[in-house]
Image: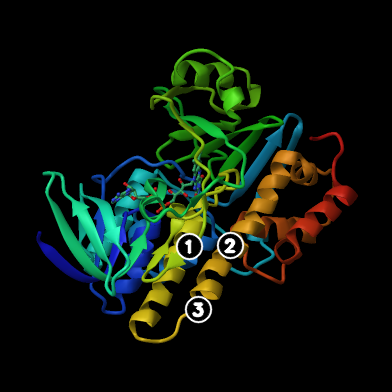
Amino acid sequence: MAKEIVDVLIIGAGPAGTMTAAKLIKSGLKVKIVERTHFPRYVIGESLLPQSMQHLEDAGFMDALVARNYQKKIGANFRQGQFQEFFDFSENYTEGWTWTWQVPRDDFDNVLAEEVQKMGVPIEFGSSVIDVNMEIEHPIVKVKNEAGESYEVEAQFVVDSSGYGRVLANLLDLNEPSASPTRGTLFAQFKPAAGVVTGEENNKVTILVHNKDVWIWLIPFSDGRVSVGFVGSPEYLESEAGDAKTRFLAYLGTNSDAMEMLEGMELCMEPKEIKGYSRGIKQLYGKNFVLTGNASEFIDPVFSAGVMFAIESGARAADLIVKQLNSESVDWQNDYEQHMVNGIEVMRTYIDGWYDGRLRSLFFAHSKPEKIKNQITSVLAGYVWDQTNPFVSRSEKTLNLLSEVHGNLEVV
Ligand code: FAD
């Protein structure tokens, strides 16, 4: 069987994979990405967080991204009936970027993939990683191309950035049940009907509380399209009969806020459904491998944190791989796994607080001190490692206390 030799083999060319690749190639390593699909390809997850912007700039992606003229996102708007609260990223408690973008991911991921190829990282599209042998000094990865031919890649290090493909988690038996309840999503895109002009209020993501357990995202893009999705329990998403489109339109029709926001717009993408996407994982690294982005843990999407964790994990993994391949000692447990778990657990606290009502009651409180709002805004912008923010360093306690003191009892 043919064999290729590289320093680092990356599985998957989503944001986790391309961020890792862009940082590794700067250190002069020989890097290759194997990507199952052909780009541009559709993937869900279009609302980014400001915390990612510094990484995108450091990795050298910024000029190419700016040229795409994506919709600027300056904050997040939450609505529940008469209650509404806007969190403006320019009021961040943590220092850092105060805006980001809302991006059609087929285009965004394609730009990152094109840029890493220009930097010198080959991407083999249309090929899948189907097996690995991690038990030897240099791992061997088995790849199958579109013609059905298999070949081997010998690497010093393997990065799994395969997202929902979860290649190493499946092959090395690393999957665990998710700590989050099973939820599903029904989603689609709208575009303005002929002659309709949109534009106002497009610079934010809107999250509508549909009912206690179900919420809706509305993410406008710069070309006028709006991504719309329901997230909730499988019971709710199957409470109407019919295919995804029938059910999606039935649920949408019962939400007057969403209908008002989509006035003058028409469906431009067949509604799709995904169930049970949350995943747990036993470990995020092992001998000569690391899991990044969705290939590791994936929690609920209510605060649009998926790409942020993908980019953070990719950037951090790359720095540690460079050290390891330079024969420096690396503390993967503390500097990678614990770091990622810390951030994920902060976000999980607020996701749990969202669904059990504590966070919504604080969001929609009639008055809350400005500093508290700034600190919440920081978490919503993705700054979940800023230990000076009590909403990060003592997340559960702070949420409990403040939702009791300032919470709005009419909500929930
Ligand atoms: P991906 O972007 O999934 O890329 C993985 C790549 O690996 C794919 O291109 C795939 O083809 C490839 N691959 C898979 N298997 C193989 C194989 N065997 N060999 C080779 N290649 C392979 N995130 C946000 O930031 N904002 C949001 O608003 C948001 N909303 C979401 C809403 C919902 C309902 C859900 C479920 C998720 C949402 N997310 C959101 C999360 C987001 O989709 C992911 O976190 C993000 O795409 C992860 O990026 P990644 O690079 O890890 O994986």
Q: Label 2, on which residue?
A: 341
Q: Is residue 220 above or below residue 18?
A: above
Classify mark 2 as within 8 Å of ligand 1 or not, answering yes or no: no
What is the x, y in percent for residue 110?
30, 51
Which quadrant is the C terminus positioned in? top right
Q: Secondary structure at mark 3?
A: loop
Ligand 1 has an atom within 8 Å of the beta carbon of the residue at disc 1:
no
* Residue extending furthest toward the top: 241
Q: Amino acid at mark 3?
A: Asp
Question: Which residue is drawn at the image coordinates 11% and 44% (left, top)?
Answer: 147
Sooner in the amino-acid sequence: mark 1 or mark 3: 1
Tell me which amino acid carries mark 1.
Leu
| Left or right placement of residue 320 versus residue 139 in this view | right
Sequence-wise first label, 3 or 2: 3
- Which quadrant of the figure has residue 273? top left
When the figure is inspected, residue 162 is found, relative to residue 187, above or below; the finding is: below
Question: Which residue is under mark 1?
Answer: 284
- The residues bearing labels 3 and 2 have C-alpha atoms spaced at a distance of 15 Å
- Spot occupied by residue 379 in the image (x, y as percentages of width and height): 65, 58
Camera-nearest residue between 24 and 276: 276
* Residue labelled with disc 3: 331
